[in-house]
Amino acid sequence: MSEPDICWRVCREIYADLRGLGGVYMAQRWNHKGQAVVYAAEHPALAAYEVLATQNFIGPDDSIEKQVLLEIDLSAVTGSIETAPPFDREDKMESRDYGTAWLQENRTVLLRVASVRVPRSTNILINPSHPRAEELSFEIHAFSFR
């Protein structure tokens, strides 16, 4: 499998960065609470679907209109990607343990993982604590679910 040059992230405007604060505040599929991590996808459509499948748009700060699309350039970190092994989609602890170990050990900047929601699709996790993470760059694009 070739290395991706670009990945995509749909997020609220206030989180249009690569700090990975969501993982600090809550556990997700590939991290335990307290771990900074950025979730992205191989394609903008997958990034959008992952957000729709996991988020509740319930208040003005969570408004569906306040989303942006990040185009993340990965070309500077070529050679710093790991591919997660197959995992039991029903066992969130297995993937959380694996992802958290990957983050804490700073093994690579990027972790390629299978999408739980869309078969044959790939998500890309970014470890913002990895020394090479500062080599990543991104562009912010307007985005709307409407």
Image (spheres, rainbow, N blue to C red):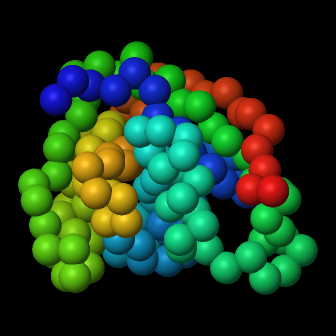
Can residue 126 be seen in this snapshot? no
Q: Residue at x 48, y 50 (%)?
A: 46
Asked where in the image residue 138 lies, by quadrant, the reply is top right
Query: On screen, 12 above or below 30?
Result: above
Left or right? Give the position of 76 relative to 103.
right
Of 81 and 24, nearer the camera is 81
Q: Position of residue 32 (x, y in %)?
A: 35, 74
Position of residue 129 in the picture relative to residue 45 (left or right): left
- The image position of residue 134, as x and y in percent, is 49, 29
Q: Residue 4, percent across and down?
A: 34, 26
Question: Is residue 4 visible to us here?
Answer: yes
Q: Residue furthest right?
A: 60
Relative to the observer, which residue lies in front, 50 or 33? 50
How far across and down, in percent of the image, does residue 57 sit? 74, 76
Q: Residue at x 14, y 74 (%)?
A: 88
In-image side of 100 versus 62 (left or right): left
Query: Which residue is more in the foreground, 107 or 90?
Result: 90
Q: So how many labels did they put on this image?
A: 0
8 with respect to 13 (left or right): left
Q: Say which residue appears at 49% left-offset and 77% top-offset.
A: 26
The quadrant in which the C terminus is found is bottom right
For image coordinates 13% across by 67% down, the residue present is 87
Q: Quadrant of residue 35?
A: bottom left
The quarter of the picture where residue 60 lies is bottom right
Compared to residue 111, the image places residue 6 above or below, namely above
- The residue most toward the left is 85
Placement of the N terminus among the 4 image quadrants: top left
Tell me if residue 56 comes above or below residue 131 in the rendering. below
